[in-house]
Image (spheres, rainbow, N blue to C red):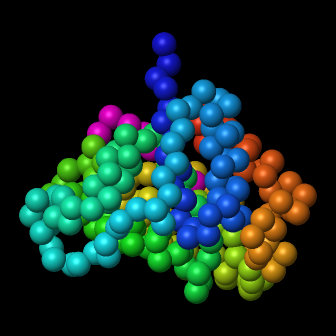
Amino acid sequence: MEKEIRVLGIAGSPRRGGNTDLLLAEVMRGAASKGAKVKTIVLSELNIAPCQHCDVCLKKGRCKVDDDMQMVYKELAAADRIVLASPIHFMSVTAQAKAMIDRCQALWARKYVLKIPPLGGGRQRKGLFISVGGRGVANLFEPALATIKALFNTLDIAYGGDLLFARARVDGRGDILKHPDALHQAFLAGQKLVEETPPQ
């Protein structure tokens, strides 16, 4: 019997029902169509404090701040696939997504200081990044991609690709619905994420 694949969707947009939310929902629907167990968490609904750089995690491998990030750590550890969705804010991810990423400093400490698997062993994890930006500049996604790839690398999550949509025609709420095949691309990406085995 094949192991059930668990897919965690992380909604990083503070605007509910916006373009990244719609794309994320389709990715998760695609993953579910291949038998994956899917769950989405919405960062704007959680209480996640910024990293305090207190360095407690360097000794204990866990964050001392007792807030909703403790739940996020558990969900990340339980997932086989992680889909992080964030629109572009000031050339990077949203404040909500960045707060979560910065709190993964505790997982960085586990890996690089304490020399233990950041999310625990036994799983081959793979990740996907979804983003939408209203501007058409050539390097619009580069800062966000650098951040996401650094996060995935730290957490031993193989980078499985991205869905990136730019220019003003996708800046308004729901504008992605006018794109000829964006939602279909997202559905197929969700299927592919489940079907392909992450590299060792």
User: Residue 52 in the image: x percent, y percent?
Assistant: 23, 78
Magenta residues (range):
121-128
Q: Quadrant of residue 145?
A: bottom right
Q: Quadrant of residue 85?
A: bottom right
User: Residue 165 in the image: x percent, y percent?
Assistant: 75, 68
Residue 186 part of the magenta-drawn span: no
* 185 w.r.t. 177: above or below: above
The residue furthest left is 59
Q: Nearer the viewer, residue 149 or 183?
A: 183
Residue at horizontal 32%, vertical 64%?
104
Horizontally, is 76 left or right of 199 in the view? left
Residue at horizontal 26%, vertical 48%?
117
Q: Nearer the viewer, residue 105 or 28?
A: 28
- The reply to whether residue 127 is visible in this rendering is no
User: Residue 59 in the image: x percent, y percent?
Assistant: 9, 64
Q: Nearer the viewer, residue 49 or 191?
A: 49
- The reply to whether residue 191 is visible in this rendering is yes
The residue furthest top is 1
Q: Nearer the viewer, residue 131 or 2?
A: 131
Horizontally, is 29 left or right of 52 in the view? right
Residue at horizontal 16%, vertical 64%?
64
User: Residue 5 in the image: x percent, y percent?
Assistant: 50, 32
* 160 w.r.t. 166: above or below: above
Q: Quadrant of residue 131?
A: bottom right
* 13 w.r.t. 127: above or below: below
**Quarter of the figure with the C terminus:** top left
Residue at horizontal 27%, vertical 43%?
120
Tally the marks: 0
